[in-house]
Amino acid sequence: MTSRRPQGFSLLEIMVATALIAIALTAVMSAQGNTFLASRRAELVTTATMLARQKIVEVEIEIQKDMRRNEFPDEKSEGGKFEEPYDDFRWEWSVERVELPAPVVGDEASVQSFIGKQLTEEISKSVRKLKLTVLWKEGEGDEEESLSVVTHMVKL
């Protein structure tokens, strides 16, 4: 007579298989959660980028209107909130004069030094740096995220 081997799985085999499935599902769920967070962050950054583009165009138009009235601000700043449905985002912008360092030339009394100083003064009079920052809170914490854009404007 031959002995028959019992059919089916032993309790140990079932426990090992269950443990492996639990570990695999935990890894999959963790990856899924991280994907959700990354997707949400990408959505917020994309929204902030589009809002920054819109706002910087508005500010440039405002400054160009001022330039037509022969007003070119040395320094100016404002801030506020975006309208619905983007009221979770706020903005700050500032305009400041661009100060270029004077060129270093050997002799202070030379023509090159004089021309270099004149050029840097004229450039400083006609160039402004415009910085726009969009801020938002990403989660329930107090930490604020931001996206900044810088451009320069020239009065010709």
Image (cartoon, rainbow, N blue to C red):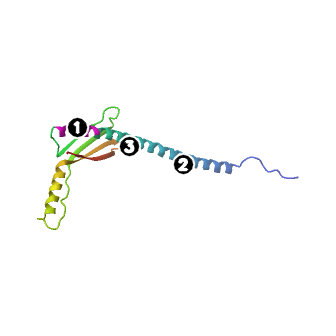
Residue where numbered disc 1 is placed: 62
SS type, badge 3: helix
Query: Which circle, 1 or 3, is nearer the viewer?
Result: 1
Left-right relation of 104 to 88: left
Left-right relation of 59 to 71: right
**Residue 95, horizontal then vertical, whole percent:** 21, 45
Q: Marks 1 and 3, how far apart in space?
A: 25 Å
Q: Residues within 10 Å of mark 1 (few under 14, many from 20)?
A: few
Q: Amino acid at mark 2?
A: Ala
Q: Is residue 121 magenta?
A: no
Query: Which circle, 2 or 3, is nearer the viewer?
Result: 3
Q: Marks 1 and 2, how far apart in space?
A: 52 Å
Point out which mark residue 27 bears.
Answer: 2
The front one of 13 and 93 is: 93
SS type, badge 1: helix
| Residue sticking out furthest to the left | 109
Q: Amino acid at mark 1?
A: Glu
Q: Marks 2 and 3, how far apart in space?
A: 27 Å
Q: Residue at x 51, y 47 (%)?
A: 31
SS type, badge 2: helix
Q: Quadrant of the C terminus?
A: top left
Q: Amino acid at mark 3?
A: Val
Q: Which residues are magenta?
A: 57-68
Residue where numbered disc 3 is placed: 45
The first of marks 1 and 3 along the sequence is: 3
**Residue 3, horizontal then vertical, whole percent:** 84, 52
